[in-house]
Amino acid sequence: MPTLHFYNTLTRKLEVFAPINPELVTLYTCGPTVYDYAHIGNLRAYTFADTLKRTLLYLGYKVHHTMNTTDVGQMDSDADLGEDKIMIGVRRAAERGEQVTAMDIAKLYTEKFIHDRDSMNILPPDELTPATEHIDAMIELIKILKEKGFAYKTSRAVYFDVSKFPTYTQLSGQKLEEQLEGVREEVVVDPEKRHPADFRLWQLDQPNHSMLWDSPWGKGFPGWHIECSAMAMEYLGETIDIHTGGVDHIPVHHTNEIAQSEAATGKKFVNYWLHNEFIRVNNVKMSKSKNNFYSMKDIIDHNFSPMDLRYLYLEAHYRFPQNFTWEALQGARSARLNVTEQVAILLTVHHDQELENIENHELRNKFANYIADDLNIPGALSVMWEVVRSKELPGSTKLALLLDFDNVLGLELEKIPTIYTKFSLDEIAEIQKLLDDRENAKKSKDWSSADELRNHLTQKNVRIIDTSEGPVALLG
């Protein structure tokens, strides 16, 4: 297998991947804040993390993968300002006439996230960890930071003192003076903060919040950033191999994770930081106010499959911005359906054969080289198309290669239904007889009978595809 390389945001260069434990890669993914539907930008981030995990598995690694869900503590500003997003979800429900609790909202949108995740064939993590189930671990981590002098308390919150952590801006590359707090009229900024970039570890100034816990500093709830550090270290250890998330997390959330984690343990928190770029819609930033803020429901309402969206994401490298248009999604659907039809034909023709051993096939090696090069999935797709279009490769080899590649691409090619998965043996025999009769009618130039036999097959939800290996009966 080829040497795996990743672009590490921390060092700003391409690096050879060397896991702490060669037997087991530790992977942490920033998950959703469960107060609303995941949007297509979120879904791109989770698809990227999925192709990363699938690539690791394909190249022979075992993976321990943890993803969080934020069900308390993330404010509607990364600077810890404003309203908790879960409470925004409660307020929106109340405006619709629904009387629900914060945990009702979190449970509802966690379930919807899992549904969207599964519909896109994204492999589930080993742990999906809600923040509210790990409050004790967060309190213990804050205690350590306080004891070591990295944290201080005001009447409003417990803060991390960024001035005590000299490499605070290493991930973002910004100067500390640039880490300014965004101030809005409706937000009261804590006058007791020592520096505008100091961030909340424990919130104390929202007595009307519906989720409050006792702590050594008073009743409150955790800051968003401390949650990921506590959960990542609880499940994966004090130093983990890979941490993923969107580029929007770099300047604040992930910068804060590094600071609080390394200040507490004295150890490097993450060895490889991988970040995906944004989705734009018609070359404009996605925004509800612009009416271009799409969820999976919108995709399905436009009669597209979640697999069409997945294919669209695969067409762009994760570190490059991607532009979403309905025309682009249509193009992705057309390409995906072309592949699935080719695989359906191969599955039908070779249904009774064992898959070939293509472990050392040159095209498999070419595919592996692409994915090992910082997840060059567009390059990997080009190899898939090379297989699909080849006139030299035997069909059995094509099938083995395409199903093998799909372990990374995740397009569910192995689930494509054929007449052999949908019909009984007697029905299959009848379909084959109709095919044979139609071929004989065509040879006899009895076009009327040939058309009648085709219509008979159509009534059975079977269509005929003429291939180099003869006519093949496909579903649909």
Image (cartoon, rainbow, N blue to C red):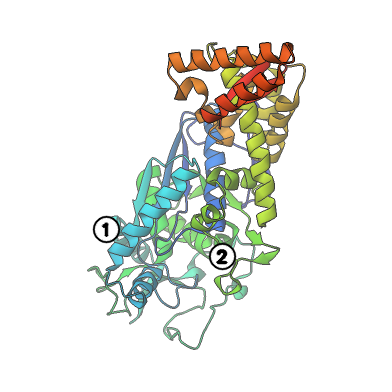
In the rendered image, which residue does mark 2 sit on?
A: 293
Disc on the earlier residue, 2 or 1: 1
The picture places residue 378, in percent across and down from the top left corner, at 70, 40
Q: What residue type is labelled 1?
A: Asp
Are the two marked residues, 2 and 1, in contact with CB atoms closer than 8 angstroms?
Answer: no
* Mark 2 element type: loop
Q: In this view, does 208 lie above or below 350?
A: below
Q: Is residue 280 visible?
A: yes
Of 474 and 455, which appears nearest the observer?
Answer: 455
Q: Specify few, some or many for label 2: CA neighbours under 10 Å numbering under 14, 14-19, or 20 or more.
A: some
Q: Which quarter of the picture shows residue 98?
A: bottom left
Of 364 and 136, which appears nearest the observer?
Answer: 364
Of 445 and 312, which appears nearest the observer?
Answer: 445
Q: Which quarter of the picture shows residue 333?
A: top right
Query: How much space separates mark 2 and mark 1, taking CA atoms?
Result: 36 Å
Q: Is residue 268 visible?
A: no
The picture places residue 171, in percent across and down from the top left corner, at 59, 58
Q: In this view, does 131 lie above or below 312?
A: below
The picture places residue 257, in percent across and down from the top left corner, at 47, 59
